[in-house]
Amino acid sequence: MLDALSNPQILAQLTVVGLMLGALYALMAIGITFIASIMKLINWSMGEFYMIGSYVQYYLIVLLLGPGLWYLALPVSMLTVFAFGLVVQRGLLAPMFKYDEARRFEYATIVTIALSVLLQNAAIILAGPYQWSPQEYLPTRAFAGLSLNGSRLAGAIGAAVILALFYLFIRHTMVGLSFLGTAQNRLGAQTAGIRLGRVDMVAFGIGAALAAAAGALLAPVFLVYPTNGITSTVKGFEIIIIGGLGSLPGAVVAAFGLALVESFGSFLISPAYQDLYGFVFLIAFLLFRPQGLFGERERRV
Amino acid sequence: MGELLRSLRDQPLRTGLGAAVVVLLALLPLGLNGYQTQVVMLGYFWVILGISWNLLAGYTGQFSLAQHAFATIGSYASAAAVLALGLPVPGGIVVGALTAAVLGYGLGWVTLRLRGIYFAIGTWAFAESVRILLSVNYHITRGDAGLPVPFLFATPDPFPYYYVFFAVSMLALGLNAVVLRTKLGYRMRAIRDDQELAVASGVDVVKWKRVVFVISTALAGLGGGLYGHAIGLLSPNQAQFSQMAFVIIAVVLGGFRTLWGPVVGALLAQGLAEALRISQEWRFVVFAALVILVVRVYPPGIMGGLAMLAERLRGRPPRSPSVGTPVAETPIAERGGVP
């Protein structure tokens, strides 16, 4: 098998497939780690935001817009989930701040796990256990001898655009900088006059919207069904540990890294084990470099 | 042990109540038909998993999300021992519990040195990997088609199974009560309440967390082994996350961090689900909503509520609940928060 890699065609194909998927993994991982860095919680219902995003996208395309306008459906789907995220944060998660740190983690974990179960089963009741797929976003193209799946290509482009916008927003607007400040030091940010309640709420909404974008963009590839968010949540969690909890660049690098490993691994070893490589890396990082690629070593009191 | 007996003697009302519940549960099958007995028997599977999780998450503060995976490991390891090695079924169940404990030791070794968030994610990813491995290696495990395993008893009658599950549940409950009053129990709660303080007081935090994790995973493995040989068919779906979610739901409803919480929560959830005669999906929607309500409005759960009620009836000023004591509204500077 290994000698097949000397074939530049195969090498390029595997790399491109990995890079395209990496952009989408990055969306999910950035969403998780952004919420984690600001609210200091892990949102276990991230996969359900992904799922809702994919359903909104699917129904918009099928009932309203038609397959050609997937890029119009995408922002609508993100906005819907953004609004839902605001409600969830305000109604269910904001009350956690009345507890101390350890209890807060417990509260957030129990509530988001329960929410995840609730949404998954509500989706089965409402939409049925069926798998749907919107039409391919773009036709499959041949480019320099490589065959590019149109939906994956469209997804990668969409993800790259969203990530670029997210970067500009975070780095170059006052609101974005206030998010970064809050992520660095909540108390300091509060002293500087930043309203933490509002920052938390919007940050949670943005994280949820990023998951929804991943769901919407991957709808034709990984299909639309009530539990379709689980796999990408697993990947997202693995990526944020590998990249370093709370680190945005770490999440991007780890997302591309994991996607490339999966792409090559499924060719060299077996596609059946594709979903296990992330776990192997996760354990390796926990053992040898628990702070992740870009995280800082924590100091204990 | 001595301390447990003393507290049993000093609180006759509580002791009497507990004994009455145990006797009631022991006599329960006399009033039930075969099907209902089967339903309650399966409820005990959740009781065992709930106790194993509460020991770890409730009393030690280590939020494991892999109890269901360790139960699944117990099931499959026991099946392997019985089918491949020809062990008798009880021997297989012991092998299942031991396998879960050994793997638990390994996973704990990797993840317990780190903060709780890493432990939660690490155990969660472990559970998903167990599920994937079981369904991918279908030439060994028969994957999603399911693996038929021999039954524990030669009879399809649910009553002997009921008493096996009942006995193991009560033993687990007793073990939990004893542990809480040993040095280990105090160390566990010290770790949960303030890990830095526990370190400063000379508790080998990582070591005792591992000990509790091994006890907890062994118990989960034992429950899983019993479950497999009571159902007769194993499936990788046992390692689905919804199973873990059900454990959390049961414990939180019954009372997180209370001795009887997992028993009350699991049997109530199982009984209620059966009485309502609603579909699996509606069950999960209703229970998940209930859990959110409990955590949001009244975190001590049923047993925590009963304890407070009892205190009030005795005319004592109510103790503040052990869960969810509010602190100042303004955020405190986070110690060792996410960077």
Image (cartoon, coloured by chain):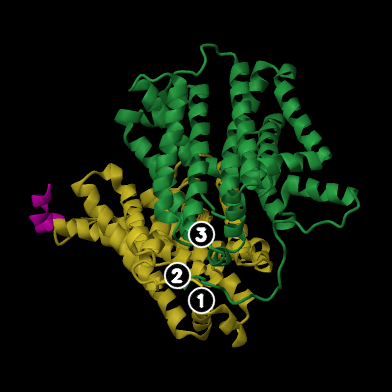
Chain colours: A yellow, B green
Q: For this view, does B300 lie left or right of residue B134?
A: right
Q: Please give the residue where the numbered disc 3 appears in the rendered image.
A: B116
The chain that hosts pointer 3 is B
Label 2 environment density (alpha carbons within 10 Å; few <14, some 14–19, many ≥20): many
Amino acid under label 1?
Ala
One can see residue A34 in this view: yes
The relative height of residue B7 versus residue A178 in the rendered view (above or below) is above
Q: Is residue A191 magenta?
A: no
Disc 2 element:
loop
In the image, which disc is placed on residue A246? Answer: 2
Q: Please give the residue where the numbered disc 1 appears in the rendered image.
A: A183
* Along the viewing direction, whichever of B92 and B197 lies nearer the viewer: B197
- Whether marks 2 and 1 lie on the same chain: yes
Q: CA distance from mark 1 to mark 3?
A: 19 Å
Amino acid under label 2?
Gly
**Residue extending furthest top?**
B155
- Residue drawn at point x = 33 percent, y = 31 percent: B138
Q: Main secondary structure of the magenta part?
A: helix
Q: Is residue A4 magenta?
A: yes
Question: Residue B86 sits in which quadrant?
Answer: top left
Asked if labels 1 and 2 touch by Cβ distance under 8 angstroms, the answer is yes
The chain that hosts pointer 2 is A
Q: For this view, does B324 lie left or right of residue B199?
A: right
**Residue extending furthest front?**
B2
Magenta range is A1-10
Residue A292 screen position, x and y as percent: 36, 66
